[in-house]
Amino acid sequence: MNTFGQALRVTTFGESHGPALGAVVDGCPAGVALSEDDLQPALDRRRPGQSRLVTPRKEADRVRILSGVFEGRTTGTSIALLIENEDADSSKYLDLRDLYRPSHADYTFDAKYGHRDWRGGGRASARETAARVAAGAIAERLLPGVEIVAWVSDVADVGSEVDEAIVTRADVDVNDVRCPDAAAAAQMTARIEAARRDKDSVGGCVRCVIRGVPAGLGDPVFGKLDAALAGAMIGIPAAKGFELGSGFDGTRLRGSEHNDAFVMRDGRVATATNRSGGVQGGISNGEAVTFRVAFKPVATIFRSQPTVTRDGEATEFAARGRHDPCVLPRAVPIVEAMAALVVADALLRQRQIAGF
Amino acid sequence: MNTFGQALRVTTFGESHGPALGAVVDGCPAGVALSEDDLQPALDRRRPGQSRLVTPRKEADRVRILSGVFEGRTTGTSIALLIENEDADSSKYLDLRDLYRPSHADYTFDAKYGHRDWRGGGRASARETAARVAAGAIAERLLPGVEIVAWVSDVADVGSEVDEAIVTRADVDVNDVRCPDAAAAAQMTARIEAARRDKDSVGGCVRCVIRGVPAGLGDPVFGKLDAALAGAMIGIPAAKGFELGSGFDGTRLRGSEHNDAFVMRDGRVATATNRSGGVQGGISNGEAVTFRVAFKPVATIFRSQPTVTRDGEATEFAARGRHDPCVLPRAVPIVEAMAALVVADALLRQRQIAGF
Amino acid sequence: MNTFGQALRVTTFGESHGPALGAVVDGCPAGVALSEDDLQPALDRRRPGQSRLVTPRKEADRVRILSGVFEGRTTGTSIALLIENEDADSSKYLDLRDLYRPSHADYTFDAKYGHRDWRGGGRASARETAARVAAGAIAERLLPGVEIVAWVSDVADVGSEVDEAIVTRADVDVNDVRCPDAAAAAQMTARIEAARRDKDSVGGCVRCVIRGVPAGLGDPVFGKLDAALAGAMIGIPAAKGFELGSGFDGTRLRGSEHNDAFVMRDGRVATATNRSGGVQGGISNGEAVTFRVAFKPVATIFRSQPTVTRDGEATEFAARGRHDPCVLPRAVPIVEAMAALVVADALLRQRQIAGF
Amino acid sequence: MNTFGQALRVTTFGESHGPALGAVVDGCPAGVALSEDDLQPALDRRRPGQSRLVTPRKEADRVRILSGVFEGRTTGTSIALLIENEDADSSKYLDLRDLYRPSHADYTFDAKYGHRDWRGGGRASARETAARVAAGAIAERLLPGVEIVAWVSDVADVGSEVDEAIVTRADVDVNDVRCPDAAAAAQMTARIEAARRDKDSVGGCVRCVIRGVPAGLGDPVFGKLDAALAGAMIGIPAAKGFELGSGFDGTRLRGSEHNDAFVMRDGRVATATNRSGGVQGGISNGEAVTFRVAFKPVATIFRSQPTVTRDGEATEFAARGRHDPCVLPRAVPIVEAMAALVVADALLRQRQIAGF
């Protein structure tokens, strides 16, 4: 299953140290203005080497559109996206081919397939998300009037305060940690730097708001908008938790405290509060869709850790080379991309099921 | 989208107050011993009226198998399950047809379809989950050696302590609140009863452990086992959060604290701890799969709340009739059913992709 | 795979001699006027016992809508259709459980599943098509302005002449053989009666025209409208051939003879001839879609034929009971139903992919 | 819909004169030996310029594997195939952008999408089949013991006699027309040359036999093996007809003449004849699967033909440049590739549904 989506279907391919990775986007309506320049900014936000907080791997991550666009507009046929791997020196991974890095996918790939590309994590590498980000940028082209903004809301024990009603991507990108709360960002940076000094890593959360989603997207039973978002987000490498609107904290409220009263606002049905997170019964209600995603601390650390080899021998492993002590800042555009894919897919499906 | 799963596909149908609801289960291998008696116990655990904690609606919820089983074994063709609605008096909902109950799906259905079955929530009713529970019981038949046990871990501010390695469904069913920690269960019951007295409702969490999942289930990119579980769980009515293994709390740990060291145990690769929750890189690693699902407080309360009518007039709404102050105990078999569907689907897909 | 279609998905279930058969239709837009009375006429045309030419099995084939319709209109959620089996005396099949009827699916079911419902063919019975016909009648409701008319064009060596531009279902139903060419119909009837007298059976062809299909339906590569029709038609029991437009005969023409010149007609692009059969490059061109389906002679005959038992012993088999000597007249509504499902599916998909 | 298959899913992309075309093959089991050298021979058989009978367009059609294969074996993840377009001079098509070539997809693409890549047919070009052929070669790797052989059985009015039990691809490739009946091949060549001299084109049929298909592949209702083959074949550009086994001719037989008696052969259940074409009730019966596909005469001819412009003005069109007068020889590997995809898909699905 390397395909995501029902109406807007994204099929990705590629390994960290193979010749290339990419995606085929199928189901995109015809006539949408699209060029490589529309995709590159999203990839630039995701790619490594942007700041001293993240991995120094050098990848230009230039995306090429191979099909499905003609004279600057989509044709309605499949759009192939290709990103060549440039900095793919796999020799440094040679000593990893026969051991299982803790909390990585090395063992599970072997258990599943009996055979794996061990170079830099192969298909399990977070590098695979470059293809998702490129596809997500296409999805955003289908969502005029929809604003998707994600940011690092938590790093380790440091939280933040951000006004979801107005925050922009420009606000988010103002610092390297991608937290628009400047005071929190400074503390988060300190946590990340401390982890780096300790040859360790930190985790945290990304919060995302989607403003301008029209009411009526998502299906009531198995195609719920929030369920699709949950699956999309937990499918991002290192994600361990998802909550919509009030989430886990909301479980401590009573119904009378939690319910969102309906009111009229600007001539339309709205809610006075938004503990629902913009989705009710699996369908968008016109309020901002808000959710938070938990990311575990990066598994790759420079400390020595006990593990076993493929042959079941006890051994030790300490990472070398280039690795983030914190995945959060680079997760921001990935969260946005997956959110865009989910909402665009729901939008296209709604074109089909809507009143006849 | 009323279909769930890729290899084991469950298509459900039916409204709360229509003539019947049910499911068609497709992709079930041939030769599996199956009868209605295998399905009824799960339905009995889900159905209303089991205790004074939950809704007194009287439904026998008898499930009939209409196809796909012959001489006590599955034939490999589609299995249709039918549950007739018996206690479907919709007259009491007549006054609801023109207003939007707060934090229900009334408004979003209208926004989506322009037309809805307003009788008892129609397709958005939690009654729809009866079909999922019946289908889940079929999925369990495909999982010999796998034990799926869910329980109420939290109600409002009351948590619990349960040994995930040994807890059984019998332990869970020992009390009405379905929490195998007796002291916690007593407190939870008090919270629920207090909410009922206050014409209010409470939320909470269900925790689930799946023991015996073989290593290798789930796909690395978009068909991740944990992502599928997340989508399945957030697709349950009233679910607002999902976390696997260490979840949100794990984001506060450092990598050196969070990583699960590989060790040899009983001659196989195992992990010394299980913060990963049994899934690494989207694929099961042979450890217990553990997750927690957050459920908001029940939206239906007997207090008067402000809302609007379909015509946009301000009005008040207070529920009447039969309604749970707490959805948690009945969510337990639903969580188990959806978990079974996810794992069985992954198991069947693994039969296809595994080494040739 | 008991599901047909991408946007309009029909999942069928049921065996010939089980308690019931039916279908779940998913993806039908909301707001479509629909009642059981819209479905029954199609079922009545398909059901046995309509004339002395076809099987005398007595089945009322009453269809019930269990979900997805409220106050006379579709809700946009899954529509369940149920047809109870009434005349399901399977005792007469007891002697068939251990032998393989020639050119039936008995052996292949055993080879596939190792287990089969041998009562009246079980899932392989043409009775299963009742569910398709009911679903097809829903599809027709999505196709105002589209006229689908099929008829028996050939029986054994007898062909016919019918004006595809104007033929109606009423014309077709004017005789039992469902051939609107009266002279041919008389000869066909003679062929069928002769076969019956000889305890034998005959084959033939059904031709179908779909008028009013808007240009632009079907996808260019794998979702071609003609390919979907081909798959749908060959999926009907006993179908062995499919040809669109000029079909096999057209292979003897030269390009200059076969090409359909474009002309303007009534202010729109049209073709002077229609050897393409209304589809070019997999996409409808606005002309009538025309095709022909070949059906082999009925496998069930009253003559004794050599075969083998499940244990590989040579034996003889001669059918008893009620069986058509000719499947053609009853295939007519099935061809129409499958055609309606294909075109409606393409129409809904077009709503999604069309210019944005 | 640019994806084919359920278990083995092939998603293709690319236009005739874009930068590249290709496919992503998903669902291929892990551990299958595979290299580019396994794919190239099939592409070489399909590519233009092989003989004086077919188009002289020069394309090396070198296929690259970009992912999913490591150390010479498939990894179980998505396999991306890329074929660069080399000889993509689209300038000669400039005069076609505003008119509709007769019996091409020019008009229907405009009707569907409102926008099309007019260079050489764009996505509708038969060049797109190169991606299918490459994917089909992967499918063949999953079918050890299965032999798929197609050949040109008819050109215009010239038929042929070939022993389906023993014919090989080497026999087929012995002449340019790809008909292993030498006498017929000579006549076919004469027909093609005559058409070329007349600035015209011819049609014909491809016959295909698949030997060694195990009994039990295909699903009984909507996933029938023959229906899948029909859809796959009619999805090939210019295909207008499909027949399995006895096909259209078989409709003239009586049941007693048409039925295939079961016998024991080599210790297994077999049929004395094979009018069923190897499929009964949609499921393979272990006999050779045999079918025939009709291809219309090539639409592109060098004679002047009347047509209309996009603006609805009457005009004339005569092709220039490089074009086949007969598509048949190059259709042979395409038919084989699509057949391989269908059978491999059924094989993988059978791994999932087979007795548990």
Image (cartoon, coloured by chain):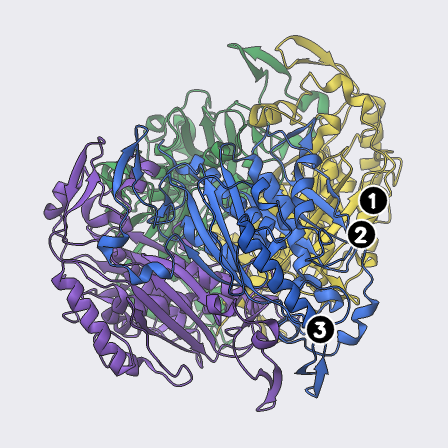
Chain colours: A green, B yellow, C blue, D purple
Q: Which of the chains bears the disc numbered 2?
A: B
Q: Which of the chains bears the disc numbered 3?
A: C
Q: Mark 2 falls on what kind of element?
A: strand
Residue matched to label 1: B61
Give coordinates of residue D11: x percent, y percent.
38, 55
Nearer the viewer's eye, disc 3 or disc 2?
3
Give coordinates of residue A296: x percent, y percent.
50, 47
Neighbor class of circle 2 (other Cα within 10 Å; few <14, some 14-19, many 20+) is: some
Using residue A291 as the reference point, say whether residue C281 is left or right of it.
Answer: left
Query: Residue type at mark 1?
Result: Asp
Instruction: Pick the quarter of the image with the C terminus of chain D.
Output: bottom right
Q: Which of the chains bears the disc numbered 1?
A: B
| Quarter of the rendering containing residue A97 | bottom left
Query: Residue type at mark 3?
Result: Phe
**Residue B74 to residue B316: above or below:** below
Residue matched to label 2: B64
Foreground of the two, C38 or A169: C38
- The disc placed on residue D43 is none
